[in-house]
Amino acid sequence: RKEVEQDPGPFNVPEGATVAFNCTYSNSASQSFFWYRQDCRKEPKLLMSVYSSGNEDGRFTAQLNRASQYISLLIRDSKLSDSATYLCVVILDTGRRALTFGSGTRLQVQP
Amino acid sequence: GAGVSQSPSNKVTEKGKDVELRCDPISGHTALYWYRQRLGQGLEFLIYFQGNSAPDKSGLPSDRFSAERTGESVSTLTIQRTQQEDSAVYLCASSLGGADYGYTFGSGTRLTVV
């Protein structure tokens, strides 16, 4: 089983739609969680951290469910510019502290 | 500097040659990571440096791969006797090192082994 799993998509949605991605992680001792965005042939960029209480940044909402070991990202009122691959990122343990990436979920917002 | 800088941005090399990739982290960032991303694939962890601690080399795929970092400055990733399967984008990221800090990536070095 992969340490971090995501549905690869693609998710094809019309502009203005609401779309949600889930990501599951296998290590219950995972400490920190992030969503990154990666545009085609570009480096990943931090979208938002994910906190236990859930957090919102404009049209983006991230939630963490430790009991079920998943995190989610909700995008409201999708824009064409939201088209990208969304990477779920977990820090698995205190010792290593390296980021572990899911393979990403591709989103295509269509006019 | 303002961001993580990597050089070269592109490198084409012949099979069997050695290559050296360079990463300049953000000033003051104690943590530095190397990742590899093959075309259409996710990011693979290679190596992690944190301050003066021993690096975590658990992701290096073979003994042809090595990396160095002096203190909290520049890091170099060296690939010896390159193979075609080494073709990928090599990404460097740096961080302040705390659990809640995000990581800033450089734009990567695209390595093509022919």
Image (tube, rainbow, N blue to C red):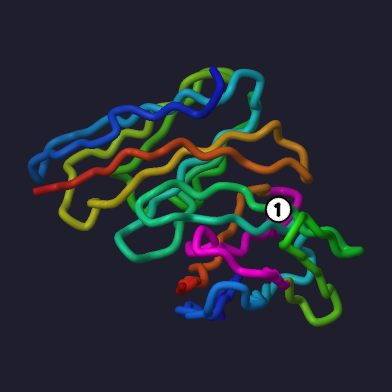
Question: Residue at left 64%, top 35%?
Answer: B95
Question: Residue at left 58%, top 18%?
Answer: B71
Give residue A103's position: percent from left, percent from top: 49, 68
Q: Which amino acid type corresponds to the residue marked 1 in the rendered image? A: Met
Give residue B114's position: percent from left, percent from top: 8, 49
Give residue A53's position: percent from left, percent from top: 91, 63
Magenta span of residues: A72-95
Among all residues in the image, which is located at the extreme right? Answer: A53
Residue highlighted by disc 1: A48
Question: In the image, B89: left or right of A55?
Answer: left
Q: Quadrant of residue B6?
A: top left
Question: In the image, B2: left or right of A72?
Answer: left
Is label 1 in a helix, a strand or a loop? strand
Is A111 magenta? The answer is: no
Question: Residue at left 38%, top 55%?
Answer: B37
**How many discs appear?**
1
Q: Relative to the observer, which residue lies in front, B7 or A60? A: A60
How packed is label 1: few (under 14 Cα within 10 Å), some, or many (20 or more)? Answer: some
Q: Relative to the observer, which residue lies in front, A14 or A98? A: A14
Question: Residue at left 30%, top 61%?
Answer: B39
Give residue B80's position: percent from left, percent from top: 22, 38
A21 to A91, vertically: above or below? below
Q: Quadrant of residue B20?
A: top left
Q: Quadrant of the N terminus of chain B?
A: top right
In which chain is the residue bearing label 1? A
Is A74 magenta? The answer is: yes
